[in-house]
Image (cartoon, rainbow, N blue to C red):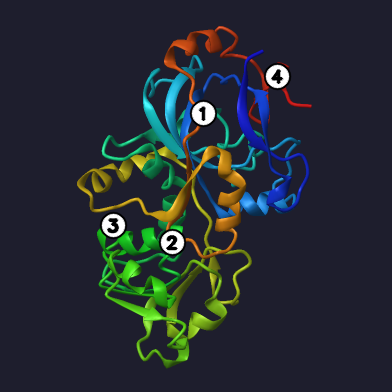
């Protein structure tokens, strides 16, 4: 049985329940890839899932949704990817009611993922940059669709400095044709937010929402503050909230669609440099410092995305010995090979 290093928890609770230890390397099903992870990103859902059983899974659970890495094995029905391809994606589709959340998340040396959930990593992006994108950019795009955003509309983005907010600001004009974009953030982040395409940035520590004279066609709330910020929306304006439950009855909750196809459509924008991955200056934590990384993201003060890098990597010459014990058709339970299932 081949083993790997992974972060996991065996009970719900604060970040201190996380442990670094050895777990079995999973086997890919017929439609799955076996990926050696080079970088992963943390998201609020990773913390929420660890704190309480919102998506119940058998213990131990390895957290993490986003990753970038290299394909080292694949199931017999995989057509789009080959061994050696560099890929990235969000491996957890929590909205798929037909599948349970994967027990094995991305804070591990090796993961399995359905081929339709990932895309080829643009060569212009580092593994860290690629890992920072999937869940956040899929969430950002879904919000525009949920609120039926129309080209030429004006919009106000609550929380433009976060992982989703920085992408919403970039996509507003680039992909959806917004005519005018305003965002809110705190004092230290004003210059930071301006670089992502906002026509105007409001410092919420100095200006109250009710003191903003302008009214907007579309209010995009990334932090769950629409109970207060709703005053900047037009009477018939769309209000989208990506937090649950929305803090105002007029707001529509927006989740995300998990798909590699979405990431592929972003390739031209990423390769041209028009769309940029945004990693927090503090946000490249080493693999052994995962607990510290969770502590930072749970402050709610991150600038862009928090990324984990410097994964323990096996030499490619060792892959053949790993694959010799991997059956590409083995039945799985929650993303772990049944005969290797964690007890």
Real-space CA distance between mark 4 and mark 3, rounded to the nearest whole angstrom: 44 Å
- Return the x and y of residue 59 as percentages of the image width and height: 76, 36
Q: Nearer the viewer, mark 4 or mark 2?
A: 2
| Residue at image mark 3 | 175
Q: Left or right? Give the position of 123 relative to 18.
A: left
| Residue at image mark 1 | 312
- Return the x and y of residue 318 as percentages of the image width and height: 49, 12
- First of labels 4, 3 by sequence position: 3
Task: Work out which quarter of the rendered image holds the C terminus and state it.
Answer: top right
| Residue at image mark 2 | 303
Q: Secondary structure at mark 4?
A: helix
- First of labels 4, 2 by sequence position: 2
Real-space CA distance between mark 1 and mark 3, rounded to the nearest whole angstrom: 37 Å
Q: Nearer the viewer, mark 1 or mark 2?
A: 1
Q: Secondary structure at mark 1?
A: loop
Real-space CA distance between mark 2 and mark 3, rounded to the nearest whole angstrom: 22 Å
- Return the x and y of residue 322 as percentages of the image width and height: 55, 12
Q: Secondary structure at mark 3?
A: loop
- First of labels 4, 1 by sequence position: 1
């Amino acid at each position: 049985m081949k083993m790997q290093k992974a972060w996991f928890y065996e009970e719900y609770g604060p970040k201190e329940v996380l442990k670094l230890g050895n777990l079995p390397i999973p086997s890919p099903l017929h439609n799955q890839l076996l990926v050696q992870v080079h970088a992963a990103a943390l998201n609020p859902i990773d913390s929420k899932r660890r704190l309480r059983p919102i998506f119940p899974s058998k213990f131990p659970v390895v957290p993490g949704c986003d990753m970038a890495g290299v394909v080292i094995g694949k199931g017999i029905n995989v057509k789009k990817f080959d061994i050696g391809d560099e890929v990235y994606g969000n491996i957890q589709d929590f909205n798929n009611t037909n599948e349970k959340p994967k027990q094995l998340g991305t804070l591990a040396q090796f993961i399995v993922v359905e081929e339709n959930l990932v895309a080829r990593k643009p060569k212009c992006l580092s593994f860290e940059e690629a890992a920072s994108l999937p869940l956040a950019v899929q969430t950002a795009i879904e919000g525009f669709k949920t609120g039926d955003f129309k080209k030429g509309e004006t919009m106000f983005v609550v929380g433009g400095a976060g992982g989703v907010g920085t992408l919403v600001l970039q996509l507003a004009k680039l992909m959806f044709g917004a005519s005018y974009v305003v965002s809110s953030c705190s004092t230290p982040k004003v210059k930071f937010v301006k670089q992502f395409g906002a026509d105007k940035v409001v410092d919420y520590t100095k200006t109250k929402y009710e003191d903003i004279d302008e009214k907007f066609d579309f209010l995009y709330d990334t932090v769950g503050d629409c109970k207060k910020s709703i005053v900047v929306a037009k009477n018939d304006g769309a209000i989208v909230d990506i937090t649950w439950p929305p803090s105002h009855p007029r707001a529509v909750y927006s989740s995300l669609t998990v798909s590699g196809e979405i990431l592929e459509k972003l390739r031209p924008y990423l390769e041209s440099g028009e769309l940029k991955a945004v990693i927090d200056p503090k946000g490249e934590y080493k693999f052994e410092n995962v607990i510290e990384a969770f502590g930072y993201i749970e402050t709610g003060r991150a600038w862009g995305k928090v990324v984990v890098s410097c994964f323990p990597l096996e030499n490619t010459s060792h892959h053949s010995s790993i694959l010799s014990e991997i059956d590409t058709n083995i039945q799985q339970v929650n993303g772990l090979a049944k005969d290797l299932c964690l007890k």
